[in-house]
């Protein structure tokens, strides 16, 4: 028993000794975690200290933000007034052209026609595909131009939609005039026809008679703009406005501009206009007017598309001029660079690659005269000169041709505006021809011989690179 107890004591001492040795060994997981943490910290520091070159893909575009305007439409509009009192029911659809003598609305002295229409709305009285498409177009147009900060147009839209649906339904029922005549209520109904030809509109706003020479900027204050929607089945009095006719396809949009912009547009005579409501374009004839307060306006005259906007007084447009279209690049990518200017006659193709270059005169250490071919890149040209890379040539270098019979000393430098193209993995200067520019972007000419093409990649910030620098992805 004594030996067994002694053995147990020895084993216990060994276990304690092993435990102490294990505690002295560093925790492996903690060491790995510490190494990973150090790596992350080093990577973060390295990222923020490293040079970051952001690429930019060149795409076609225009400086549309500088050419967006909200204009006021002027049309040849005639308001038609009621000859009697009663409940009005419209027959012609808004935006539809009517001729002299065409039925536009009925006037019911008793109100029985409305009851008759309600009683005869059966399952067959449904909207056609054309009707549904018209409603869909109106809804999409409203949604695309809705401004959350101005809720009042929602009510106008509501009345417009209600009136449109009712007029469509009435048109289906009233198409059978004989049925109404046989109902015994026709004697109380006046069938009112159009006195002139034109496009029917069921609203008035008091601007039907405004002329171009009467324009002020106050007209563009939409908070003061009041549009009266003429509602189907309303009770009207003798002499009330019942609808209006837009009598000509010739119409115009008037926009407020600065005097300089007006002069610029007037020189063009005609300008291409994009209507933001439907993205269609048309050419507008330019005329200008400056009122006694010094406010300048431009009128854009059109000979088509009036029916599309016959219910709109305020119309959003974009002016598209030729100099505004091209390759759109950020101003931060633009840089100026100096080049040597050399006569074309001293530039030739040579060397093993057959690339452009010049013959430069020099001397060896023992004073022997030499003529060496120096390959160089052409960045721009005029009728008689090339702009050459200044990294391989020096001011004062003597160039030769005709086996040294003619010489030209490099003395002339010129500056080009361009960007750094990185398609090949390094910063390669490309000259650009700026057509138009604002505070953020420039529109440059595309497909020039020494310039950019669409989908090229350039350096977003030209100050972050130098020419020929390798670009690490």
Image (tube, helix red, strand yellow):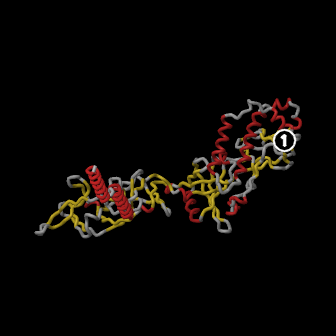
Quarter of the figure that contains the C terminus: bottom left
Instruction: Locate residue 345 relative to residue 309 in the image: left or right.
Output: left
- Residue in the image at 81% along x and 35% along y: 118
Residue found farthest to the front: 1
- 215 lies above or below 282: below
Residue nearer the viewer, 232 or 239: 232
> Would you call the spot at circle 1 few (<14 residues within 10 Å), some (14-19), or many (20 or more)?
many
Write down the residue under mark 1.
107
Residue nearer the viewer, 235 or 407: 235
Q: Position of residue 270 (x, y in %)?
A: 57, 54
Residue nearer the viewer, 97 or 147: 147
Q: Is residue 382 visible?
A: no
- 317 lies above or below 217: above
Q: Position of residue 421 (x, y in %)?
A: 36, 56
Q: Quadrant of residue 197?
A: top right
Q: Position of residue 186 (x, y in %)?
A: 87, 34
């Amino acid at each position: 028993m004594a030996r067994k107890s002694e053995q147990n004591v020895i084993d216990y001492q060994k276990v304690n000794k092993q435990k102490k040795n294990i505690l002295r060994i560093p925790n492996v997981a903690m060491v790995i975690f510490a190494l990973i943490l150090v790596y992350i910290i080093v990577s973060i520091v390295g990222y923020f200290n490293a040079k970051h070159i952001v690429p930019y893909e060149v795409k076609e575009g225009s400086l549309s933000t500088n050419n967006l305007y909200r204009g006021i439409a002027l049309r040849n509009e005639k308001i038609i007034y009621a000859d009697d009192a009663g409940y009005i029911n419209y027959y012609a659809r808004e935006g539809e052209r009517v001729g002299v003598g065409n039925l536009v609305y009925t006037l019911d002295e008793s109100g029985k026609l409305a009851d008759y229409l309600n009683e005869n709305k059966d399952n067959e009285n449904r909207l056609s595909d054309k009707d549904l498409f018209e409603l869909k177009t109106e809804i999409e147009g409203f949604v695309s131009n809705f401004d959350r900060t101005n809720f009042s147009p929602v009510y106008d839209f509501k009345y417009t939609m209600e009136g449109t649906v009712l007029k469509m339904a009435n048109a289906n029922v009233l198409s059978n005039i004989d049925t109404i005549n046989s109902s015994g209520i026709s004697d109380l109904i006046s069938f009112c026809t159009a006195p002139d030809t034109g496009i029917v509109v069921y609203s008035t706003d008091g601007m039907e008679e405004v002329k171009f020479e009467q324009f002020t900027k106050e007209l563009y204050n939409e908070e003061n703009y009041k549009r009266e929607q003429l509602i189907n089945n309303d009770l009207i009095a003798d002499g009330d406005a019942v609808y209006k006719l837009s009598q000509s396809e010739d119409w115009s949009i008037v926009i407020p501009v600065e005097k300089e912009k007006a002069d610029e547009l007037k020189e063009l005579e005609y300008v291409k206009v994009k209507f933001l409501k439907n993205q269609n374009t048309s050419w507008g004839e330019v005329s200008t007017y400056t009122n006694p307060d010094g406010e300048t306006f431009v009128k854009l005259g059109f000979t088509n598309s009036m029916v599309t906007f016959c219910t709109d007084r305020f119309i959003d447009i974009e002016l598209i001029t030729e100099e505004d279209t091209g390759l759109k690049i950020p101003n931060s990518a633009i840089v100026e660079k100096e080049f040597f200017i050399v006569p074309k006659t001293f530039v030739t193709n040579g060397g093993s690659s057959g690339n452009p270059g010049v013959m430069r005169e020099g001397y060896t250490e023992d004073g022997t005269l030499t003529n060496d071919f120096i390959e160089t890149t052409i960045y721009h040209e005029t009728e008689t000169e090339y702009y050459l890379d200044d990294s391989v040539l020096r001011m004062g270098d003597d160039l030769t041709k005709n086996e040294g019979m003619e010489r030209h000393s490099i003395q002339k430098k010129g500056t080009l505006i361009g960007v750094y193209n990185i398609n090949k993995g390094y910063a390669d200067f490309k000259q650009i021809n700026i057509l138009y520019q604002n505070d953020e972007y420039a529109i440059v000419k595309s497909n020039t011989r020494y310039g950019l093409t669409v989908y090229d990649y350039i350096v977003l910030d030209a100050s972050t690179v130098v020419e020929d620098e390798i670009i690490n992805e």
